[in-house]
Image (spheres, rainbow, N blue to C red):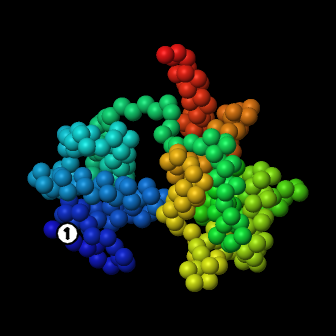
């Protein structure tokens, strides 16, 4: 039976295994999601994985958290591997492992039943994010009409992701004051994963597009307001509501269709497009990693699609 932890505001409904393990376990469980995991997307992914696993345990006659054994974790992970990709299964195992680590430290359970369980092997040498050719990226930017606030906004947002390698979440989280002048150049300030602050100067095209957007929409007087905003349906002017990620994705699909692009792109495509273009023009992997705010060049390599062109050239050697 599910129960609610008393005396806590906005407390979620607890899984049965947690509720039957006592109040201390319930509090520690909730603290795992509210205090220990700061990233919203990670929190939601972990919540889904943990909830599904604990429901599975309850259905298999496991009554408390202390009764969960490595065999339970391993069996559930094997079942997950039959219906989900290796990265997804590894993430779900990480969620369970991190939860029980948290419970061990909080003295709710004595050992972590997931610590000895191995996830599926998964080796990635090339990212799956669709990448635009520089000519396609240029065409996309040039086809955006900038006679309206929405056009100025869309061009500036896409250009920011291309030229600064910014993640869409970091771009949409910017405030107007995060675009600033320093050393006679326009700079951008991004808040990346883990709360990391990342600052870099603007490419001359990006400087032009951001300046025209901010001046054309007159948002410079609202430095604490969001940089990228929704458009009022009636006024066709910028509101003070931050542009949601799903809206940015819909905008990109619309702009790509208008430009006649056949490559199916998404929010992350511009990061990979910018990194690949930079490396093709003589940039170094180390500098690209720094610009993209990657902790390791191995991550940056996943965005490098220069090898795709070599592959295409070799395919054309089949002279039939």
Query: What residue would you read off at disc 1?
Result: 2
Tell me if I can see residue 225 in this picture.
Answer: yes
- Residue 300 percent coordinates (x, y): 59, 38
Which residue shows up at 84% across the image and 56% down it? 185
Tell me if I can see residue 177 in this picture.
Answer: no
Task: Identify whether 46 is placed above or below 242.
Answer: above
Q: Quadrant of residue 149?
A: bottom right
- Residue 142 percent coordinates (x, y): 70, 55
Toward the front, the furthest residue is: 320
Classify mark 1: helix, strand or loop: loop
Image quarter where the N terminus lies is bottom left
- Residue 257 percent coordinates (x, y): 54, 55
Task: Identify whether 254 is placed above or below 82.
Answer: below
Compared across the picture, whether 160 is left or right of 313 comes to right
Toward the right, the furthest residue is: 184
Task: Identify whether 167 is placed above or below 90.
Answer: below
Compared across the picture, whether 220 is left or right of 26 comes to right
- Residue 309 percent coordinates (x, y): 59, 29
Q: Quadrant of residue 227?
A: bottom right
Which residue shows up at 32% across the image and 57% down it? 48
Which residue shows up at 88% across the image and 55% down it? 183
Toward the bottom, the furthest residue is: 234
Q: Quadrant of residue 317?
A: top right
Which residue shows up at 64% across the image and 70% down it? 150
């Amino acid at each position: 039976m599910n129960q609610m932890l008393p005396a806590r505001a906005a407390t979620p409904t607890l899984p049965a295994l947690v509720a039957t393990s006592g109040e201390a376990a319930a509090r520690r469980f909730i603290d795992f999601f509210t205090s220990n995991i700061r990233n919203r997307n990670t929190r939601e992914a972990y919540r889904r994985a943990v909830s599904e696993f604990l429901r599975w345990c309850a259905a298999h006659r496991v009554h408390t958290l202390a009764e969960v054994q490595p065999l339970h974790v391993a069996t559930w992970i094997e079942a997950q591997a039959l219906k989900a990709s290796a990265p997804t299964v590894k993430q779900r195992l990480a969620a369970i492992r991190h939860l029980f680590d948290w419970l061990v430290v909080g003295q709710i359970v004595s050992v972590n039943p997931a610590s000895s369980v191995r996830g599926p092997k998964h080796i990635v040498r090339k990212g799956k994010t669709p990448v635009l050719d520089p000519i396609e990226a240029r065409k996309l930017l040039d086809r955006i009409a900038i006679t309206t606030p929405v056009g100025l906004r869309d061009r500036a947002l896409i250009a920011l992701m291309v030229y600064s390698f910014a993640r869409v979440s970091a771009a949409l989280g910017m405030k107007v004051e995060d675009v600033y002048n320093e050393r006679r150049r326009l700079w951008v300030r991004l808040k990346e994963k883990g709360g990391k602050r990342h600052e870099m100067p603007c490419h001359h095209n990006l400087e032009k597009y951001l300046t025209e957007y901010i001046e054309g929409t007159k948002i410079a007087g609202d430095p604490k307001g969001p940089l990228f905003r929704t458009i009022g349906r009636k006024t066709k002017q910028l509101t003070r509501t931050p542009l949601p990620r799903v809206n940015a994705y819909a905008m990109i699909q619309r702009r790509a269709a208008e430009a006649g692009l056949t490559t199916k792109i998404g929010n992350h495509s511009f990061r990979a497009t910018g990194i690949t273009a930079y490396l093709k023009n003589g940039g170094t992997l180390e500098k690209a990693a720094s610009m993209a705010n990657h902790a390791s060049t191995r991550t940056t390599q996943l965005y490098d699609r220069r090898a795709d062109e070599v592959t295409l050239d070799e395919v054309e050697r089949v002279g039939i």
